[in-house]
């Protein structure tokens, strides 16, 4: 088991640095995603769509399944719109414990040694699986595992929480630095939708 990136083997160190370079140099990103939420004594729930990211910390998750669902971050607030009840949940980014929020780090200052500890890794599924634990006790997750592809892209991401639940993301058709409209990251409340702040 590796205690951190600094003491990792040369192979793991090289992989982590290559992933950091890929995403830290990008300004925008677009990728197809599939996310599966698994919780104890509950049936797995899978959703999918397109994810768009822009520095700093802006995200737009556009769901095709279920159609119409949105998760948007403008860098200060996150908004989750659920069309089935025409409701918007709003929260400050710094107070958000949603598993999608940490993915903004892909276009932030990705630094594995600073953010994670106790790395392990092994080959598999056509790439390299890397796992690490968050250094911060305030992190909304207990462990992260990700599959690094041949071009050092993150193909899969599994986020574990202390309640025994996991959120797995699969990413395909990644595009670095696509032209993205600024309006993607400005949430527009749908007509008649109820807006509820998370603290309520």
Image: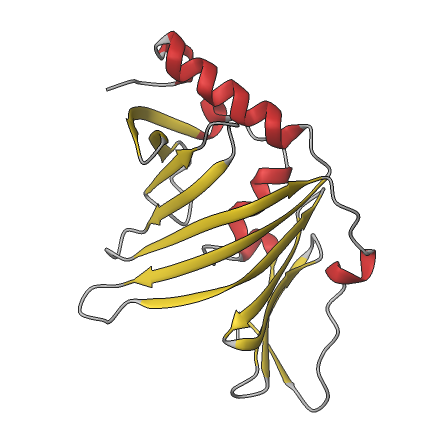
Asked if 100 appears above or below 5 in the picture, the reply is: below
In this rendering, would 3 be left or right of 72? left
Residue 103 in percent (x, y) is at 53, 46
Q: Residue at x 71, y 82 (%)?
A: 190
Q: Residue at x 43, y 14 (%)?
A: 13
Residue 75 in percent (x, y) is at 69, 52
Q: Residue at x 41, y 50 (%)?
A: 140
Can residue 97 be seen in this snapshot?
no
Q: Nearer the viewer, residue 139 or 173?
A: 173
Asked if 52 appears above or below 137 in the picture, the reply is: below
Q: Nearer the viewer, residue 3 or 31?
A: 31
Quadrant of the image occupied by residue 77: bottom right
Asked if 97 appears above or below 137 in the picture, the reply is: below
Residue 61 in percent (x, y) is at 60, 61
In this rendering, would 143 be left or right of 87? left
Residue 160 in percent (x, y) is at 31, 48
Q: Quarter of the image containing the N terminus?
A: top left
Query: Among all residues in the image, which is located at the extreme bottom?
Result: 192
Quadrant of the image occupied by residue 157: top left
Q: Residue at x 34, y 10 (%)?
A: 9
Query: Among all residues in the image, which is located at the extreme left?
Result: 41
Please state the total of marks drawn on the protein image. 0
Q: Colour scheme of this structure image?
A: secondary structure
Asked if 150 appears above or below 83 in the picture, the reply is: above
């Amino acid at each position: 088991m590796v205690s951190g990136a600094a003491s990792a083997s040369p192979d793991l160190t090289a992989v982590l640095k290559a992933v950091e370079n890929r995403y830290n140099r990008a300004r925008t990103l677009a990728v197809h995603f599939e996310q599966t939420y698994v919780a104890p004594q509950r049936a797995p729930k899978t959703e999918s769509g397109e994810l768009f990211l822009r520095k700093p910390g802006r995200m737009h998750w556009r769901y095709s399944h279920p159609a119409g669902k949105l998760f948007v971050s403008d860098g200060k607030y996150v908004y989750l719109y659920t069309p089935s009840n025409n409701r918007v949940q709003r929260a400050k980014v710094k107070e958000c414990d949603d598993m999608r929020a940490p993915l903004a780090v892909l276009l932030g200052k990705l630094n594995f040694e600073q953010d994670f500890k106790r790395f392990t890794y092994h080959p598999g599924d056509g790439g390299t699986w890397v796992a690490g634990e968050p250094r911060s006790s305030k992190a909304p997750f207990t462990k992260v595992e990700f599959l690094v592809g041949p071009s050092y892209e993150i193909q899969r991401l599994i986020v574990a929480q202390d309640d025994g639940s996991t959120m797995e993301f699969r990413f395909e058709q990644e595009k670095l630095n696509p032209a993205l409209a600024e309006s993607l990251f400005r949430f527009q409340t749908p007509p008649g939708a109820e807006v509820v702040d998370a603290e309520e």
